[in-house]
Protein backbone atom coordinates (compact mmCIF):
# COMPACT_ATOMS: atom_id res chain seq x y z
CA UNK A 1 0.00 0.00 0.00
CA UNK A 2 1.37 3.39 -0.98
CA UNK A 3 -0.19 6.80 -0.50
CA UNK A 4 0.25 10.46 -1.34
CA UNK A 5 -0.35 12.69 1.66
CA UNK A 6 -0.45 16.34 2.61
CA UNK A 7 1.43 17.47 5.72
CA UNK A 8 0.66 20.60 7.71
CA UNK A 9 2.29 23.70 9.12
CA UNK A 10 4.12 23.33 12.43
CA UNK A 11 1.37 24.88 14.58
CA UNK A 12 -1.33 22.62 13.14
CA UNK A 13 0.86 19.55 13.50
CA UNK A 14 1.48 20.44 17.15
CA UNK A 15 -2.25 20.87 17.82
CA UNK A 16 -3.08 17.47 16.31
CA UNK A 17 -0.29 15.88 18.33
CA UNK A 18 -1.88 17.44 21.44
CA UNK A 19 -5.17 15.74 20.52
CA UNK A 20 -3.38 12.43 20.03
CA UNK A 21 -1.80 12.85 23.48
CA UNK A 22 -5.18 13.54 25.10
CA UNK A 23 -6.44 10.21 23.77
CA UNK A 24 -3.29 8.43 24.92
CA UNK A 25 -3.68 9.82 28.42
CA UNK A 26 -7.26 8.50 28.46
CA UNK A 27 -5.90 5.05 27.69
CA UNK A 28 -7.85 4.72 24.45
CA UNK A 29 -6.80 4.17 20.85
CA UNK A 30 -4.65 7.03 19.54
CA UNK A 31 -2.42 7.74 16.57
CA UNK A 32 0.06 9.02 19.11
CA UNK A 33 0.83 5.45 20.13
CA UNK A 34 2.88 5.02 16.96
CA UNK A 35 6.42 6.17 17.76
CA UNK A 36 7.94 6.07 14.27
CA UNK A 37 9.44 9.36 13.09
CA UNK A 38 7.31 9.06 9.96
CA UNK A 39 4.09 9.14 12.01
CA UNK A 40 2.84 12.67 11.41
CA UNK A 41 -0.64 14.21 11.15
CA UNK A 42 -1.60 14.06 7.49
CA UNK A 43 -4.38 14.20 4.93
CA UNK A 44 -4.35 11.30 2.46
CA UNK A 45 -5.02 12.30 -1.15
CA UNK A 46 -4.52 8.89 -2.77
CA UNK A 47 -4.09 5.35 -1.40
CA UNK A 48 -3.09 2.63 -3.86
CA UNK A 49 -2.56 -1.10 -3.32
CA UNK A 50 -1.11 -3.85 -5.48
CA UNK A 51 1.61 -1.77 -7.14
CA UNK A 52 5.07 -3.00 -8.06
CA UNK A 53 7.89 -1.23 -6.22
CA UNK A 54 11.02 -0.12 -8.07
CA UNK A 55 14.48 1.04 -7.07
CA UNK A 56 14.51 4.58 -5.74
CA UNK A 57 17.69 5.82 -7.44
CA UNK A 58 15.68 7.76 -10.01
CA UNK A 59 13.48 9.28 -7.33
CA UNK A 60 16.39 10.73 -5.41
CA UNK A 61 18.09 11.94 -8.57
CA UNK A 62 14.94 13.78 -9.66
CA UNK A 63 13.99 15.29 -6.32
CA UNK A 64 14.35 18.99 -5.74
CA UNK A 65 16.29 20.61 -2.92
CA UNK A 66 13.23 20.53 -0.68
CA UNK A 67 12.51 16.86 -1.25
CA UNK A 68 14.80 15.20 1.26
CA UNK A 69 13.93 11.68 2.31
CA UNK A 70 12.62 11.13 5.82
CA UNK A 71 14.33 7.75 5.87
CA UNK A 72 17.45 6.25 4.32
CA UNK A 73 17.21 7.01 0.56
CA UNK A 74 18.43 3.57 -0.49
CA UNK A 75 15.65 1.99 1.60
CA UNK A 76 12.87 3.73 -0.33
CA UNK A 77 10.97 1.88 -3.04
CA UNK A 78 8.31 3.67 -4.99
CA UNK A 79 5.76 3.32 -7.76
CA UNK A 80 6.98 5.51 -10.67
CA UNK A 81 3.69 7.27 -11.56
CA UNK A 82 3.34 8.43 -7.96
CA UNK A 83 6.68 10.28 -7.95
CA UNK A 84 6.74 11.60 -11.50
CA UNK A 85 7.62 15.18 -12.31
CA UNK A 86 3.96 15.74 -13.16
CA UNK A 87 2.81 14.69 -9.70
CA UNK A 88 5.46 16.92 -8.15
CA UNK A 89 4.11 19.81 -10.18
CA UNK A 90 0.77 19.44 -8.40
CA UNK A 91 2.57 20.62 -5.29
CA UNK A 92 2.77 24.04 -6.92
CA UNK A 93 -0.65 24.58 -5.35
CA UNK A 94 0.97 24.49 -1.91
CA UNK A 95 0.75 26.00 0.60
CA UNK A 96 -3.01 25.53 0.60
CA UNK A 97 -5.35 26.86 3.29
CA UNK A 98 -7.51 24.10 4.80
CA UNK A 99 -9.92 24.00 7.72
CA UNK A 100 -10.01 21.07 10.15
CA UNK A 101 -13.47 20.81 11.60
CA UNK A 102 -15.92 18.55 13.41
CA UNK A 103 -15.19 14.92 14.32
CA UNK A 104 -15.94 12.10 11.89
CA UNK A 105 -16.51 8.44 12.69
CA UNK A 106 -15.91 5.53 10.32
CA UNK A 107 -17.38 2.44 12.02
CA UNK A 108 -16.27 -1.14 11.58
CA UNK A 109 -17.81 -3.59 14.04
CA UNK A 110 -17.39 -2.54 17.64
CA UNK A 111 -14.63 -0.09 16.78
CA UNK A 112 -14.23 3.00 14.66
CA UNK A 113 -11.76 5.38 13.09
CA UNK A 114 -12.06 8.76 14.82
CA UNK A 115 -10.96 11.66 12.67
CA UNK A 116 -11.13 15.40 12.15
CA UNK A 117 -13.15 16.38 9.10
CA UNK A 118 -11.46 18.66 6.58
CA UNK A 119 -13.59 21.21 4.75
CA UNK A 120 -13.71 20.20 1.05
CA UNK A 121 -12.97 23.59 -0.49
CA UNK A 122 -12.68 24.02 -4.25
CA UNK A 123 -8.92 24.44 -3.89
CA UNK A 124 -8.53 21.17 -2.00
CA UNK A 125 -10.83 19.27 -4.36
CA UNK A 126 -8.94 20.62 -7.37
CA UNK A 127 -5.62 19.48 -5.89
CA UNK A 128 -7.07 16.06 -5.09
CA UNK A 129 -8.42 15.63 -8.62
CA UNK A 130 -5.14 16.79 -10.15
CA UNK A 131 -3.06 14.34 -8.12
CA UNK A 132 -5.30 11.47 -9.22
CA UNK A 133 -5.27 12.57 -12.85
CA UNK A 134 -1.48 12.85 -12.88
CA UNK A 135 -1.12 9.45 -11.19
CA UNK A 136 -3.38 7.52 -13.57
CA UNK A 137 -1.98 4.19 -14.79
CA UNK A 138 -3.35 0.67 -15.12
CA UNK A 139 -2.74 0.26 -11.39
CA UNK A 140 -5.08 3.15 -10.64
CA UNK A 141 -7.78 0.47 -10.53
CA UNK A 142 -6.28 -0.54 -7.19
CA UNK A 143 -6.89 2.87 -5.61
CA UNK A 144 -8.98 2.48 -2.47
CA UNK A 145 -12.48 3.59 -3.53
CA UNK A 146 -12.98 6.01 -0.66
CA UNK A 147 -9.94 8.05 -1.80
CA UNK A 148 -11.01 8.60 -5.42
CA UNK A 149 -12.55 11.83 -6.76
CA UNK A 150 -16.27 11.91 -6.05
CA UNK A 151 -15.96 9.38 -3.20
CA UNK A 152 -13.37 11.09 -1.02
CA UNK A 153 -14.08 12.27 2.51
CA UNK A 154 -11.06 14.37 3.48
CA UNK A 155 -10.02 13.84 7.10
CA UNK A 156 -7.14 13.71 9.55
CA UNK A 157 -7.11 10.55 11.67
CA UNK A 158 -6.97 10.81 15.47
CA UNK A 159 -7.50 7.11 16.32
CA UNK A 160 -7.72 4.03 14.11
CA UNK A 161 -9.32 1.45 16.43
CA UNK A 162 -11.36 3.37 18.97
CA UNK A 163 -13.82 1.19 20.87
CA UNK A 164 -17.34 2.54 20.50
CA UNK A 165 -17.65 2.20 24.27
CA UNK A 166 -14.82 4.78 24.59
CA UNK A 167 -16.30 7.27 22.12
CA UNK A 168 -18.17 9.47 24.60
CA UNK A 169 -15.13 9.79 26.88
CA UNK A 170 -12.88 10.58 23.93
CA UNK A 171 -15.12 13.29 22.51
CA UNK A 172 -15.66 14.83 25.95
CA UNK A 173 -11.91 15.09 26.52
CA UNK A 174 -11.08 16.61 23.14
CA UNK A 175 -11.55 20.31 22.44
CA UNK A 176 -12.28 20.07 18.74
CA UNK A 177 -12.44 23.73 17.81
CA UNK A 178 -11.89 24.43 14.09
CA UNK A 179 -8.25 24.71 13.06
CA UNK A 180 -7.31 27.08 10.25
CA UNK A 181 -4.36 25.19 8.82
CA UNK A 182 -1.93 25.29 5.93
CA UNK A 183 -1.13 22.18 3.91
CA UNK A 184 2.55 22.79 3.21
CA UNK A 185 4.13 19.54 1.98
CA UNK A 186 3.37 16.55 -0.23
CA UNK A 187 4.88 13.19 0.67
CA UNK A 188 4.77 9.60 -0.48
CA UNK A 189 4.26 6.97 2.24
CA UNK A 190 5.07 3.32 1.49
CA UNK A 191 3.39 1.19 4.16
CA UNK A 192 4.94 -1.98 2.74
CA UNK A 193 8.40 -1.07 3.99
CA UNK A 194 7.58 1.76 6.40
CA UNK A 195 9.32 4.61 4.56
CA UNK A 196 8.28 8.06 3.45
CA UNK A 197 9.70 10.59 1.04
CA UNK A 198 8.99 14.28 0.82
CA UNK A 199 8.05 15.21 -2.75
CA UNK A 200 7.60 18.93 -2.21
Image (spheres, grey):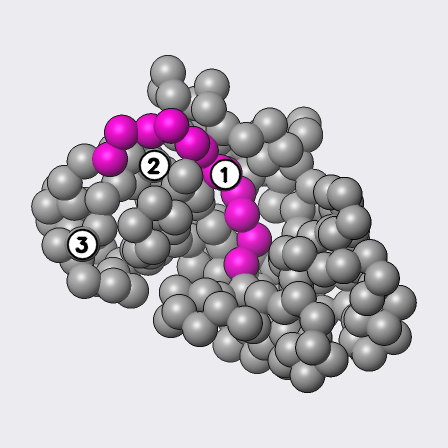
Question: Which is closer to the viewer, label 3 or label 1?
Answer: 3
Q: Distance between the Cα atoms at labels 2 and 3?
A: 17 Å
- The answer to whether residue 96 of the structure is visible from this angle is yes
Left-right relation of 107 to 181:
right
- Gap between marks 3 and 1, in whole Å? 22 Å
Q: Kindly identify the residue that appears in the image at 70 percent across and 71 percent down.
A: 28
Please tell me which residue is depicted at 27% across the width and 29% down the height of the picture: 52
* 10 Å crowding of disc 2: few (<14), some (14-19), many (20+): many
Nearest the viewer among 5 and 76 is 76
Image x and y of residue 175, in percent:
81, 77
Q: State the residue lying farthest toward the bottom.
A: 25
Which element type, helix, strand or loop, lies under badge 2? helix
> What residue occupies the far top of the structure in this picture?
138
Please identify the quarter of the rendering in which residue 150 is found: top right
Q: Position of residue 90 (x, y in %)?
A: 42, 42
Specify the quadrant of the image occupied by residue 164.
bottom right
In terms of depth relative to the viewer, which is nearer, 179 or 27? 27
The N terminus is located in which quarter? top left
Is 75 left, or right, of 20 in this rendering? Answer: left
The mark nearer the N terminus, 2 or 3, is: 3
Q: How many angstroms separate mark 2 from mark 1 (CA)?
A: 9 Å
- The numbered mark, 3 or 1, whose residue comes first in the sequence reads 1
- Image mark for residue 46: 1
Which label is found at residue 82? Answer: 2
**The residue stretch that appears in magenta:** 42-53
Residue that badge 3 annotates: 75
Near mark 3 (Cα within 10 A), the count class, few <14, some 14-19 or many ≥20, is few
Residue drawn at 63 percent across, 56 percent down: 160
Q: Which of the 4 quarters of the picture holds residue 68?
A: bottom left
Q: Residue at x 59, y 35 (%)?
A: 147
Amino acid sequence: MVSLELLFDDLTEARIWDEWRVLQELGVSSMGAHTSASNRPHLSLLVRSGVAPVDAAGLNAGAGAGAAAESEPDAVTVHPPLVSAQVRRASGRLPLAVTLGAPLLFRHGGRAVLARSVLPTSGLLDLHAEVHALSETVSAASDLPHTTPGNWTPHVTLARRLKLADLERALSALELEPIEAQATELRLWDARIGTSHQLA
